[in-house]
Amino acid sequence: MYNFSAGPAQLPGEVLSRAKEELLDWHGCGISVMEMPFSSDEYREIADAAYGSLSELIGLPDNYHILFLQGGAYAHFAIVAMNLMGGQAVADYVQTGHWSTRAINEAKRYGRVNVVASAESSGFNNIPVYDDWTLDPKADYCHITTNETANGVQFHRFPDTGAVPLVADATSDFLTRQMDISQFGLLYVSAQKNIGPTGLTVVIIRDDLLDKAMDITPSVFNYGLQAKNNSRINTPPTYSVYIAGLVFSWLLGRGGLTVMEKINAGKAERLYEVIDADDLFHCTVEPADRSMVNICFELKNASLAEDFLREANSRGIINLKGHGVRGGIRASLYNAMPAEGVDALIEFMQDYSAGHSGKAITGAESDS
Ligand SMILES: Cc1ncc(COP(=O)(O)O)c(C=O)c1O
């Protein structure tokens, strides 16, 4: 079975096997990780190890903290604003698709949001050219979505926003490539794509941004307070942190993010090549801005989409249905998707195309 879900997504088989072995009794302590008090020495060991291996993976600079919180990125759309808009109450946002639009709508509750660039008029098929952004030098931060999971566009280069901290929702491509953390003031990530099970939100924050929260910020979502208390002022998502730690070790064991980036780029390139070469398929995202991890495409004859998905399922190739806002097909190629999964998908697409030659008419034509 190959699971192309956009999230919650496939986890590495080795990680699940290890979790299974340790499920009832973690390292001989007699209880499951799920049953441990979060103040226990055992849980501290688990959380500290996860923190350590994540720091090593991303090359965490000394002046940053990692927080293991709850809420999901959707909650942090608001929580980021509450934590960082305590100064001018002004932030710049770049609108690149479904998730950045939601981030904008949440942030608006807490201050003035300038949408400094938007790809809405192109149907979110590209990343707006940086030179055209109209940044406010006094903004509290500038927000981007590094990869739009629903639309299949991705930043392949990050803007230099000068003294204004760059803040990023990196939910769907964090750990799939090398990133220079020092380019960002803050990154936040829901776990369920490349980190582990749902329930955990990882926040990486530069220390000078830790004390800017508005008074209305709930204590458990006050980044400064959580940093001072090792993300333990309330019950952390302990089991998710444990699995995340196993995933971080798995990634280190594979050679780290430079290696993963190469593997992931190879998987994506092969799939886009097939989409572009075959008359049955079509990708509307501009080539320079295409996502390496959420490959969104359509069947030119839209009426075949349901049949395509059914056939794929019958071959054990599952969860290819595109996001509701965009429709079509979406193959998510996160870290845990092996190259063989992409081979299987490509083979299926080529077989399907061969069985439907001459049917690559557009949806509009097929309506007539
Ligand atoms: C880029 C991006 N941001 C935010 C979210 C929302 O995450 P959650 O549902 O965990 O709050 C998602 C979910 O898929 C996402 O892909």
Image (cartoon, grey):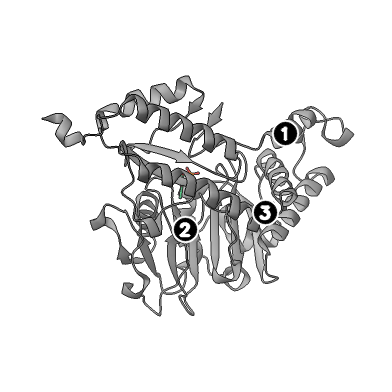
Residue pointed to by mark 2 = 146
Quadrant holding the C terminus: top left
Of the residues under marks 3 and 1, which one precedes in the sequence?
Answer: 1
Of the residues under marks 1 and 2, which one precedes in the sequence?
Answer: 1
Q: How many marks?
A: 3
Asked whether, in this view, residue 299 is left or right of residue 365, the answer is: right
Q: Are marks 1 and 2 in contact (CB under 8 Å)?
A: no
What type is the residue that disc 3 sits on? Ser
Q: Assess disc 2: are there few (<14), some (14-19) or many (≥20) residues with their C-alpha within 10 Å of its C-alpha.
A: many
> Percent from the top left, x then y, of residue 85?
45, 67
Residue 113 placement: quadrant: bottom left
| Mark 2 CB lies closer than 8 A to ligand 1 | yes
Residue pointed to by mark 3 = 231
> Percent from the top left, x then y, of residue 356?
31, 26
Give the Cα separation between the discs numbered 3 and 1.
17 Å
- Disc 1, SS: helix
Q: Nearer the viewer, residue 230 or 324?
A: 324
- Disc 3, SS: loop
Q: Nearer the viewer, residue 7 or 357?
A: 357
Q: Are marks 3 and 2 in contact (CB under 8 Å)?
A: no
Q: Residue at x 71, y 53 (%)?
A: 255
Q: Assess disc 1: are there few (<14), some (14-19) or many (≥20) residues with their C-alpha within 10 Å of its C-alpha.
A: some
- Disc 2, SS: loop
Residue 337 in view: no
Q: Nearer the viewer, mark 3 or mark 2?
A: 2
Q: Residue at x 47, y 66 (%)?
A: 157
Residue pointed to by mark 1 = 34
What type is the residue that disc 1 sits on? Met
Residue 140 placement: quadrant: bottom left
Q: Residue at x 72, y 42 (%)?
A: 242
Give the Cα separation between the discs numbered 3 and 2.
25 Å
> Percent from the top left, x then y, of residue 165?
50, 72
